[in-house]
């Protein structure tokens, strides 16, 4: 039950942040799907000392109501770049 609640909270956060930062909404009846995580620490070498900063980035697949290139209204304070990716592009990125 705890893991299920955490997943729902994460999905709700993705949906909320997608709309706040890009103006896009999820397609009704769909949920975001996490497909990849990336972690980094700083400093990145233990010889340089214990890590003091940690970043965890999660990547999600989403179906948006305006799929295919609807108007994106980026919140420039939060978003540096935004791109539409096709299935082939996502598959290529995940194979790295």
Image: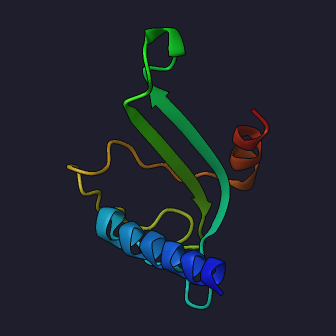
Q: Which quadrant would the N terminus be assigned to in this image?
A: bottom right
Q: Which quadrant of the figure has residue 87?
A: bottom right
Q: Position of residue 16 (x, y in %)?
A: 38, 75
Q: Which quadrant would the C terminus be assigned to in this image?
A: top right
Q: Position of residue 50 (x, y in %)?
A: 44, 23
Colour pattern: rainbow
Classify 66 as above or below 68: below
Relative placement, left or right, of 87 versus 47 is: right
Relative placement, left or right, of 55 versus 61 is: left
Name, please, the residue furthest toward the front: 50
Q: Position of residue 81 (x, y in %)?
A: 38, 43
Name, please, the residue furthest toward the bottom: 29
Question: Can residue 10 be seen in this snapshot?
Answer: yes
Which residue lies at the image location 55% right of the left edge and 89% below the top edge?
Answer: 28
Classify 55 as above or below 4: above
Which residue lies at the image location 43% right of the left edge and 72% below the top edge?
Answer: 13
Classify 14 as above or below 81: below
Name, please, the residue furthest toward the left: 77
Which residue lies at the image location 35% right of the left edge and 63% below the top edge?
Answer: 22
Classify 49 as above or below 4: above
Q: How many marks?
A: 0
Relative placement, left or right, of 21 versus 34 is: left
Front residue of this view, candidates 16 and 72? 16
Question: Can residue 65 be seen in this snapshot?
Answer: no
């Amino acid at each position: 039950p705890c893991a299920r609640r955490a997943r729902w909270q994460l999905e709700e956060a993705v949906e909320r942040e997608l709309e706040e930062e890009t103006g896009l909404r999820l397609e009704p009846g769909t949920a975001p799907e996490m497909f990849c995580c990336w972690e980094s620490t700083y400093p990145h070498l233990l010889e340089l000392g214990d890590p003091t900063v940690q970043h965890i980035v999660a990547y999600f697949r989403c179906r948006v109501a305006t799929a295919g290139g609807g108007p994106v209204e980026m919140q420039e304070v939060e978003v540096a770049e935004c791109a539409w990716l096709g299935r082939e592009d996502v598959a290529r990125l995940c194979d790295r």
